[in-house]
Structure formats: structure tokens, C-alpha cells
Amino acid sequence: MRLRELLPGPGGLLLFFGAWEVGVRSGALQYEYLPAPSVIARAFAGMAAGADLWDEVGHTLVATLLGWLIACGAGTAIGVLLGLSAKARRYTLASIEMLRPLPGIAFAPLALLLFGFSLQMELLVIVAPVLWPALINSMGGVAAVSERLTEVARTLRMKPLATVTTILLPAAAPSILVGARLSLTLALIMAVAAEMIGNPVGLGYAVVREQQSMHPDRMFAYVLVMGALGIALDAGLRGVARLLLPGEFSRPAPQWGRS
Amino acid sequence: MPEVVFEARDLGLTLPAADGPREILAHVDFTLAAGEILTIVGASGTGKTSLLRILAGLAAPSRGALTYRGKPVDGPQDGVAIVFQDYGNALLQWRSVARNVALGIERQFKGEALRSRVTEALQLVGLERNANDYPWQLSGGMQQRVQIARAIAMRPAVLLMDEPFGALDAMTKATQQDELLRLREATGASVIFITHDIEEAIYLGDRVALLSGSPGAITHRFEVGLPFPREQVTTREMPRFVDLRHELHEAIRATGGH
């Protein structure tokens, strides 16, 4: 039963890699720099045996998590405060809507000028765009809590602070988590991008390096490692959320993004 | 003469609307004595929910005076608990039944004292075996009982109920009505029960007030005078019950209700 539930997901992936393998070997896919999955796997095995790959994973992981913690923490805090006050929203929403569409990667040249080739440079490129999903979702989540619940709090004679901590924040938790998940994914993307065009370390730089030294098999292996890292980060966050919100996760549906 | 708990004198409510101020309530007068059930019956659009929000201290009246135990109501009052119609919104879906019931008392009571008050409230509504369930695992009637238990746990002097059984099916509704009457016996709380269901208003009430017209006003008052304990079949067949139902329908027709 469990195996049958688990199979369809990886099954699609296996099919994809199988078709790729057959395509390359049969000559249907003829590109000079498109290696077969088996060749990529062999390259990965070689990389995994050395220390460089793990150093690079470690660097990108640290940059992603650090940037995410800063951005998601600040974004959620600001978002919750804005969610609590319709007046504060009226005064800030126009500015937020103006700043939000700025592509985060556009900060890279500025970050380079400010911080040079450093972790700070990466963090600036990560934090600037990653702030928004956390802010917007937590703000929307708190603002959308049913007015009935605040009336319940008032009639039960709860103090404002208790209302926020025992009613509004838990009620908004699913939206806050959506923001946290979106921003974590974005943080990884921005870390890799910052490493590709700025700070020459980590997985992002490794991909560029392998490309320039004509090692497409190693380059693909790095790309797949990034994918795996993204999946692992998301799963980790879901695991933490499951511990923090037992009631939310035992509900049948909907779970994420309940309004 | 029993103590007067709530007294409303000539309450009125005017709210701003797109086409200028709109009068929602006019001339609402009533008193609620300790231990009594006053049912307020009215068609939709007569301002029932607005009236309950004013009684609960969630909204201020535009005119008139409302007192609770002789003092003007300027916000939610100690000793007054509210049961809303939409239990789905009013319960904390992420908390177990027991923790929902604890919500109003968990700051004053801890540990064993809290547990025993929660258990007592759950026993009064017959949900002691569902303490660890989540609201979404329960039927509508059971969820509404969770909300009633949460109110009871506060040991209120007055229960304000806004069409609490309006969303329930007929059979569940009948059971809940009998449970409410039992609960009143057990706790001695006064109840203001707002409904659009004429028979429910008679069945539950010591007195019935008719809210009618637009803006809504209390136009008729009836002493029910039916014996307790009431019984779903026989009470509803008593001549007094049938007469009252007739009079209420007549009164609603005369005031231009639906």
C-alpha cells in the first residue's frame, strides 16, 4: 500500500532519466555536451568521494539558511505587524508594491561593490528578494483571520497580547508557513545566482567552473545536487512545521494555504 | 421579584451605508431577570445579530441605554458568555476540544484546577469522551456543543446565544434544545436566545419577545407559561403552545413581517 503510494512520484523521474539515457545512447539526442545520466552518475560518484563537493554544498547551504533566516524572520515579523493594523497597511502597501517587483539579482552588482567577493555580498542578494514572500504571506494570513475569532477573544475577556499569541498567530500559521516555504526555495535560487555571478564559491560557482572547463557531466551532477538540496530543505521545513503544528497537519485538507 | 440582569431601554442603532445612514434597530426595550430564558424571535433583516452584538458589548448602540447588573455596558462584560451561530469560525480549529473549552479560563486556572473545570463543562454538554478530538472531526451539533461548553466553563451568569442551532438539522436541533434547558437547570444561568424559528422561541422561552419591522423594534411580548420540563412532542401539542404559535404568526403578519 505504502509502496504503491510512493511509486508514482519517483516513477515519473525514472521514466524521464530512462528516456534521456536511451535518447543519448541511441543517438536520437545528439549534442556534444549532453552526457547520458549514467555518465553523470559516474561523475557524481567521483565527486562524492572527494571533499570539494561537500565543502561547496556546505557553503551554499550556510548562505541559503543564513539569508533565509534573516529575510524570513524580518519579513514575517513585519508582515505580522502589518497584518494586525489596517492603518499601517494603508500607509505601507504602495511602497511594498513598488519595491517588491525589483528583481533580486539586480542587487548583485551593488552588493559586489559594497562587500566584494564575500558571504555578505551573497546575503544581500538573498535577503532583498526573499523578504517579500514571507512578508506578503504572513501579512495576508494575519489580516484574513476571521473577525469572529477576534470577537471570541474579546468576549472571553482576553488581553490584546494574548489574542495575538493564542489566536491570531496560530490562525495565520498556515499562511506564515507558506511564506516560509516559498522564501526558502527562493533563498536557494538566489544563493546559487549570487555564487554564479558574484562570490566565486559554493555550488553556483562550481557549475560555472565545470562549464568553463568543459566537464558537462560534472556540471549536470552539480545541478542535480542543487535540486536534491532544495528538496531536502523543503522536507526539513515541513518536518519542523509538523512538529510545531500537530493540529494543522492531522487535518485532512486543505493544509497549506488555508485562509 | 428576581434580580434584573440585563435592561435595555429604547435601544437604537444607525449604521452608515452607501446611500446614507441606515436605521437597523429602533425602540428595543426588554429586561432579563436572573435565571430566566428570554427568546427574541425575528425574521431575517430585523437586526437580530446587531442586537446581540450590542448586548455582547461588541458594538455600541446609537441611542438608548443598556445596563448589565445596573451598570452601563461599554464592552464585553465579566459573567456574560456568547455562543455564535457559526461554530466553524468561532472554534479554534488547531486546538483540541478540551483546549478550545479551556480558552476562556486558561489564564486564571492551571493544572488540575483547569482540567477539572474543562471536564465539568464537557460533561455538562456530553462531550467528555471527545476531549482530545479536533473540532473538524466532530459533527455540526457536537461542534456547537463545544462552543457552548467553552461558554459554560466561564461559569457565566448570562448566556447570549445568536441562532446557535440555526445551522443544524431538525433532529439535532431538537436534542440541542432539550440539552440547553437541562443546562439552564444545572447552572442557573440566564439566557438570551435569538432565533428566527417561532416554535423554537416558544419551546425554549420563559418569555418571548418579537423583533419585527425594518428598522427592528420589539413590538410584542408573550409570557409562555408552559410547564417544565418541556418535551418535544407533548409540549408542542399543548393548547397553550398552539395558541402562542398562532398569536406570534398573527403578530408577525400584522407588523409586515415575512
Image: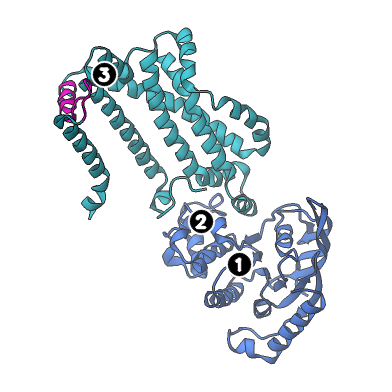
Chain colours: A cyan, B blue
Range drawn in magenta: A29-47
In the displayed structure, B73 sits above or below B157; it is above
Please state if A9 lies on the left or on the right of A67 as rendered: left
Badge 2 marks a residue whose secondary structure is helix
Do badges 3 and 1 share one subunit?
A: no
Identify the subunit bearing mark 3: A
Along the viewing direction, whichever of B18 and B97 lies nearer the viewer: B18
Q: CA distance from mark 3 to mark 2?
A: 49 Å
Q: Position of residue B169 (x, y in %)?
A: 54, 73
For the residue marked with disc 3, what is the amino acid? Answer: Asp
For the residue marked with disc 1, what is the amino acid? Answer: Pro
For the residue marked with disc 2, what is the amino acid? Answer: Asn
In the displayed structure, A189 sits above or below B138; it is above
Task: Find residue A25 and report its image quarter.
Answer: top left
Q: Position of residue A126 (x, y in %)?
A: 44, 22
Q: Residue at x 69, y 92 (%)?
A: B239
- In the image, which disc is placed on residue A55? 3
Q: Residue at x 64, y 77 (%)?
A: B200
**Total numbered labels:** 3
Residue annotated with mark 2: B100
Please state if A198 lies on the left or on the right of B230 as rendered: left
Task: Find residue B194 and report its image quarter.
Answer: bottom right
Badge 1 marks a residue whose secondary structure is loop
Q: Position of residue A74 (x, y in %)?
A: 51, 28
Q: What is the crowding at mark 3: few (fewer than 14 residues within 10 Å), some, or many (at least 20)?
A: some
Q: What is the crowding at mark 2: few (fewer than 14 residues within 10 Å), some, or many (at least 20)?
A: many
Q: What is the crowding at mark 1: few (fewer than 14 residues within 10 Å), some, or many (at least 20)?
A: many
Residue annotated with mark 1: B164
Along the viewing direction, whichever of A66 and B155 lies nearer the viewer: A66
In the displayed structure, A132 sits above or below B254; it is above
